Image (cartoon, rainbow, N blue to C red):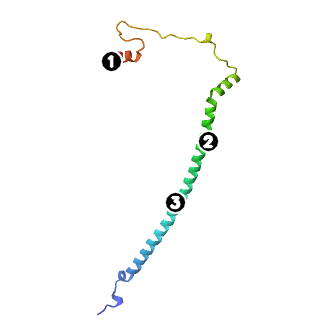
Amino acid sequence: MAKSRKNQSAAIRFGPALKALFLCLLIAGSAIGYVWQKGQNYELGKQIIQMEKKLSQLAHDNKKRDDQLAGLRSPVMLYQRARELGLVPVQPAQVVRLTEPSFVSPDNKYSTREFAARRADATTQ
């Protein structure tokens, strides 16, 4: 014979209700997570667009300053700026030429032009 409802335990009676509640909470949590994730994607997309605009502006400013620097380094501009400051080209009499000292030790078989080779030998001894 079938058992009466009075004899059934509380866990058996509330089991389907708890399963339905858990399933509803799971679906609601997933929906809230999905909406939050879409909002994050939207915000990150806006940030990317702002950063790309800023990068474009910085590249434009960099190009403008490169062109300005090239203009300031040009020989014509340098000559004009030197004239404004009162500078004149150097006269040949103002140039002092220094000769390289010729030091040759008796035990050194290398020429005076091979400074690196002479120093390398001196450090290995």
Task: Determine whether label 1 and label 3 are within 8 Å by CB.
Answer: no
Residue at label 1? 124
Which is more foreground, mark 2 or mark 3? Answer: 2
- Residue 41: assigned label: 3
Which is more foreground, mark 2 or mark 1? Answer: 2
Image location (x, y in percent) of residue 100: 48, 11
Count of number-bearing discs: 3
Q: Residue furthest left?
A: 1
Is residue 43 left or right of 20 when viewed as pictured? right
Is residue 17 left or right of 54 when viewed as pictured? left
Amino acid, disc 1: Thr
Q: Earlier in the sequence, mark 2 or mark 3?
A: 3
Crowd around label 2: few <14 · some 14–19 · many ≥20 (10 Å): few
- Image vertical order of residue 17 relative to residue 109, above or below: below
Amino acid, disc 3: Asn
At a point 53% along the width and 62% down the height, the residue shown is 39
Quarter of the image with the C terminus in it: top left
Is residue 93 left or right of 18 when viewed as pictured? right
Q: Earlier in the sequence, mark 2 or mark 1?
A: 2
Q: Quadrant of residue 110?
A: top left
Crowd around label 3: few <14 · some 14–19 · many ≥20 (10 Å): few
* Towards the viewer: 122 or 2: 122
Image location (x, y in percent) of residue 29: 46, 69
Q: Quadrant of residue 82?
A: top right
Crowd around label 1: few <14 · some 14–19 · many ≥20 (10 Å): few
- Image vertical order of residue 2 relative to residue 117, above or below: below
* Towards the viewer: 27 or 8: 27
